[in-house]
Image: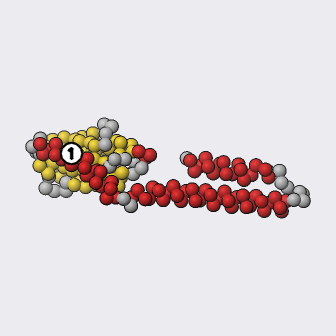
Amino acid sequence: MMAAALFTVLVCWWTSPYNTSTMHDCNYLERNAAMNARFLTATLFLCAFCCLTQQADAQDRTKTSKYLGQASEALSGLMAKAEDDGLKLEKSMTLAGGWIDKSEKWTNLYQLYLPEGTTHRFMAAGDADATDVDIRLTDPDGNVAAVDDGVARTAVVNFTSKKSSYYIVQVRVYASVKNVPCVCLTAVYKR
């Protein structure tokens, strides 16, 4: 949005003193050269601005270990609480994560088979830029079986399966500082 506003300002600056030039004007070529120079300057400025903005976003991903550490620290606290509650780390696919874009849409992480009557705790945590991380389970038909969509950097769902089935673990970063993507990690514990 800022780039669009900047572009509008630059176009207005470029065209404003020359919007009455015509082919019959004896200074047309001179004015046209000045307009082209202004257009080139405005275009280069806009390109540099966009490149620097995109580079700043890309630089965040070059520091993955920093953000992984932040998310790991938050998830470790949830894992310690699960262990205090008598749960144990599930032996199958239980730890997952990565860079998740800020979005209202859910990201599928993995599918997990849960036997009928078993109780699991699903946990998710984001890095320090994440302000709202959500986690949910869906059945193979896409029905939501359990969800934590509260506003927090972490999310926890306790779920007891009513039937033996595969469930899909999904996460999303619903909100983040400056809408940046965030590193999110998940863990699954079993009672």
Instruction: Please tell me which residue lies in front, 75 or 121.
Output: 75
Numbered-mark total: 1
Residue shown at 44% from the left, 59% from the top: 58
Quarter of the image holding residue 22?
A: bottom right
Locate residue 29, reporting x and y percent: 83, 62
Please indicate whether residue 85 sits to the left or right of residue 178 in the image: left
Q: Position of residue 43 (x, y in %)?
A: 65, 59
Secondary structure under tag 1 reads helix
Where does label 1 land, which residue?
77
Position of 160 compared to 139: left or right? left
Find residue 8 and report its horizontal and vertical position in percent.
65, 48
> In this rendering, would 31 be left or right of 43?
right
Which image quadrant: the C terminus?
Answer: top left
Q: Amino acid at mark 1?
A: Gly
Whether residue 118 appears in this view of the structure is no
* Image point (72%, 58%), residue name: 38
Pick whichever, 189 or 51, lies toward us.
51
Q: Is residue 3 visible?
A: yes
Q: Position of residue 21 (x, y in %)?
A: 83, 54
Left or right: 71 in relation to 62? left
The residue lying at 66 percent from left, 48 percent from top is 9
